[in-house]
Amino acid sequence: ALAVQRSLNSQLKFPCLDRCGKTSQCSRLVSYLEGQGQSAELWRFPDRSTSVGQMISSYLSNTSQLDDHTIHLLFSANRWEKRSLMETKLKTGTSLIVDRYSYSGVAFSSAKGLDFEWCKAPETGLLDPDLVVFLDISPEKAAERGGYGGERYEQIEFQRKVAKNYEVLRDASWKVVDACQPIEDVEKQLQEIVLDCVMSCQKGKPFSHLWS
Ligand code: NYM
């Protein structure tokens, strides 16, 4: 059945280190796509609006403590609870710009020492993005940016480990954009890459699933 499902539109994922500028770039991208006459939505993981998302949010702000495995599974559950809506949106022709996804789940949790394959397992079967864009920034440069250090994980040593894990996850299909360029240059490059993907997905493309 999956082979006949068509992804009418595209979902594009941004896994990155903290403070790389992805959140503002993602929202600029949505405006850009809308300006091009496309239906597009900005999604973000964790989605802090659900009850699972609220547990994640209080963990990230250090208001609550959770076992590493438990929080990993909550991040994953937070994606699973949005999976069918994601599929519906795509089938009805809306492109989804997703600020973080399973790649962040694996990169961050395994940086704590959890087994890499164990971290990947609960993500199996979620929708595979049509495009993954990595906004590349060194942990050192990211740390120089404002607001760093407010939430759990925003420490340079930890981010170095996360960066290494993204390298392991990264394959040839990922588009890598240098996040240290001026914001407008990053924006321009993203627009080109993303519009290209949205156009090619409109021709109709079957859904695929992680980890393919
Ligand atoms: N994060 C995010 C995880 O540890 N696992 C996940 O599955 C996801 C989606 O949450 N430090 C971490 C990465 C970030 C933090 O993300 C919150 P953001 O993009 O800063 O709101």
Image (cartoon, grey):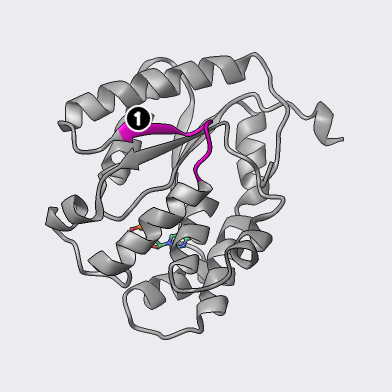
- Disc 1, SS: helix
Query: Could you say which quadrant of the image residue 128 lies in?
Result: top right
- Looking at the picture, tell me which residue is in the foreground, 162 or 45: 162
Q: Residue at x 44, y 51 (%)?
A: 166
Q: Is residue 200 left or right of residue 107?
A: right
Q: Quadrant of residue 160?
A: bottom left
Residue 26 vertical placement versus 113 (above, below): above
For the question of whether residue 29 can be seen, the reply is: yes
Q: Kindly identify the residue that appears in the image at 58 percent across and 56 percent down.
A: 79
Q: Which quadrant of the structure image shows residue 117?
A: bottom right
Please give the range of residues in magenta.
170-177
Q: Residue at x 54, y 73 (%)?
A: 114
In front of the other: 3 or 176: 176
Residue at the image position 57 percent from the left and 31 percent from the top:
130
Q: Nearer the viewer, residue 128 or 155?
A: 155
Q: Main secondary structure of the magenta part?
A: loop
Q: Is residue 81 visible?
A: no
Could you say where residue 53 lies in the image, as x and y percent from the top left?
48, 66
Across and down, in percent, residue 6 comes to: 73, 26
Say left or right for 104 vs 85.
left
Q: In which quadrant is the N terminus drawn?
A: top right
Residue type at mark 1: give it: Leu
Q: What residue did someone put label 1 on?
A: 29
Q: Where does residue 145 sit, x and y in percent of width and height?
A: 14, 53
Is residue 112 a member of the stretch shown in magenta? no
